Image (cartoon, rainbow, N blue to C red):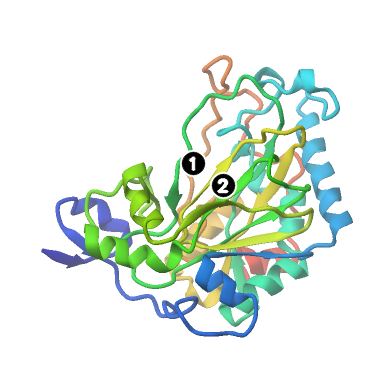
Amino acid sequence: MVATIPAAKVGLLENEEVTFPPFELAHLLSGEKYGDWRDQLTTEGYYVVKGAIPREKGLEYRDRAHSWQEEFGLGYKRDDPSTFVNEKLPAHMKGGMLHGYGAGHEQFVWDVRCEQGIIDAFAKVWGTDELVTSFDGFTIMLPNRKDVPDVGKWEHTDQSPSRRGFYCVQGLVNLNDCGPQDGGLMILKNSSQLFEKFFDEHGRKGWKSWGPADWCGFSLEQQQWFFDRGCEWLKVEAGPGDLILWDSRTMHYNCLPTGDRDRVCTYVCMAPARLMTEKDKKDRKHAFDNYLGTTHVPYDCHIRKAHEPKIRHETGKPCPLDTGIPRNPRVASPQVLKLAGLEAY
């Protein structure tokens, strides 16, 4: 049986083939020739927009991220590797991903979102500069750590098997030099255009998600199907201020640094403001007012839980410093309010 249901109710029909209603922009990045970098984004599933932010400004954002981490007073110092341990760092996941502490609403994170080069890149994909942004966090991965638990690679897509065609383009803004040993984004090159075919052959039920509908994990056996069709894992390299874009149908994961350089980046996804429903607008206002984060898709808003302090690795207890309030909260400028979806263009 095949059922067409809203994404929010996907968990109700675990034993049925599920399809979501057609997306009005599903034709994007699905075969049309553009004559520019969008062609690589279409065929290979990713693209590095060089210099979306000038290099020196990108490095300034890196400094602001490290300053944020030092200001907790736990003993972390960016130039002292002996402080690269859990007890001297804010609580994080996967070696440095930061979603607590109101991190997604820090001023420097919003300053990155407001950079014209970032907005222009997303505008080129969507065909409009009237955009809203995700409220995502950022990452500081420190090198040569010995206390990071191995939680696996987490190979996944951020698009449900129940969708057909394009749905979202994701992004991260790289804030330090990121070479082969510096940790970062791993992309299964050319997998985005095979996404639907895989599920046409294997079915659309029984897939696994950590919660939201638009997340799908892949086993090694499932990945082999892609390998057999020419896909290969690629470590994406980038410089400070470069924007890495990838189609949400592209399988990906992140890896830890194996060299001596830190990895710092912010996560940014933007999409047309007109795609928001009235519920999306209401949910986004609640998230904005309460410094809450969202998942990647800006217009189909999946709000992170009401604030709960992150659990510290070394104690197993909630971090008393995680109040959910940013240390340096964003100023609600006119541009911020438009990108937040709280003011009309």
The residue sitting at the left extreme is: 1
Tell me which numbered mark, 1 or 2, is placed earlier along the sequence. 2
Quadrant location of the N terminus in the rendered image: bottom left
Q: Can you give x and y, in whole percent of width and height, for residue 212 in the image?
A: 38, 50
Q: Regarding mark 2 in the picture, which secondary structure is present there?
A: loop
Identify which residue, 131 or 231, lies in the foreground: 231
- As measured in the structure, the alpha-carbon distance from the residue carrying label 1 to the one carrying label 2 is 7 Å
Q: Is 317 positioned to the left or the right of 268 in the image?
A: left
Q: Is residue 159 above or below residue 265?
A: below
Q: Regarding mark 1 in the picture, which secondary structure is present there?
A: loop
Instruction: Count the labels in the image.
Output: 2
Q: Can you give x and y, in whole percent of width and height, for residue 142 in the image?
A: 71, 32
Identify which residue, 62 or 288, lies in the foreground: 62
Residue drawn at 37 percent across, 50 percent down: 223
Q: Is residue 128 visible?
A: yes
Q: Is residue 316 above or below residue 291?
A: above
Residue 306's label in the rendered image is: 1
Q: CB under 8 Å between callouts 1 and 2? A: yes
Q: Is residue 344 visible?
A: no
Amino acid bearing label 1: Ala
Q: Can you give x and y, in whole percent of width and height, for residue 289 in the image?
A: 60, 52
Residue 292's label in the rendered image is: 2
Residue drawn at 61 percent across, 39 percent down: 97
The residue sitting at the right extreme is: 56
Amino acid bearing label 2: Leu
Identify which residue, 103 or 244, lies in the foreground: 244
Q: Quadrant of residue 91?
A: top right
Residue drawn at 56 percent across, 62 percent down: 246
Q: Can you give x and y, in whole percent of width and height, for residue 316 in the image?
A: 52, 17
